[in-house]
Image (tube, helix red, strand yellow):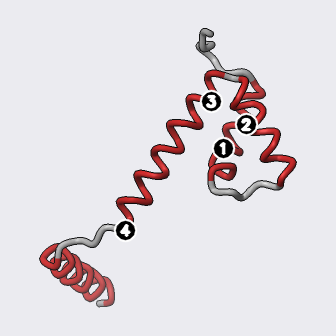
């Protein structure tokens, strides 16, 4: 199956809902509509797969703690910036 060079209007409308779909923020009816489309459209199916991987990677990185030295430098920098702005 070839992927069109320009997504259809239906694909562009679905793209708006894709993040909400992956986050589980759609009604059951909207979720089924998105699932039907991404299961039949190579372009949107690929986009959904890539976005799903990106979301998973971001969530995994968000669980990591920064080293203490980085946290300390960040706290000092924020304090310096907020003190300077308060003047």
**How many numbered circles does the render carry?**
4
- In primary-sequence order, the first of circles 4 and 2 is 2
Circle 4 or circle 2, nearest the eye: 4
Q: Dot 2: what SS?
A: helix
Residue 25 picture quarter: bottom right
SS assignment at label 1: helix
The Cα–Cα distance between marks 1 and 4, rounded to whole angstroms, is 24 Å
Residue position marked by numbered label 4 in the rendering: 63
Which labelled disc corresponds to residue 32? none
Callout 1 touching callout 2 (CB < 8 Å): yes
- Quarter of the rendering occupied by the C terminus: bottom left
Q: Earlier in the sequence, mark 1 or mark 3?
A: 1
In this rendering, would 83 be left or right of 37?
A: left
Mark sitting earlier along the chain (1/4): 1
Badge 1 vs badge 4, beta-carbon distance below 8 Å? no
Query: Who comes first in sequence, dot 3 or dot 2?
Result: 2
**Label number found at residue 45:** 3
Assess whether mark 2 and mark 4 are in contact (beta carbons under 8 angstroms).
no
Horizontal arrangement in the rendering, residue 1 relative to residue 13 (left or right): left
Disc 2 target residue: 14
Q: Which residue is mark 1?
A: 18
x, y percent for residue 56: 46, 52
């Amino acid at each position: 199956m070839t992927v069109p060079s320009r997504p259809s209007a239906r694909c562009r409308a679905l793209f708006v809902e894709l993040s909400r779909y992956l986050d589980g923020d759609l009604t059951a009816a909207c979720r089924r509509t998105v699932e039907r489309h991404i299961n039949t459209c190579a372009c949107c199916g690929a986009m959904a797969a890539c976005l799903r991987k990106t979301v998973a990677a971001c969530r995994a990185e968000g669980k990591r703690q920064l080293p203490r030295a980085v946290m300390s430098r960040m706290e000092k920098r924020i304090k310096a910036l907020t003190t300077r702005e308060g003047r």
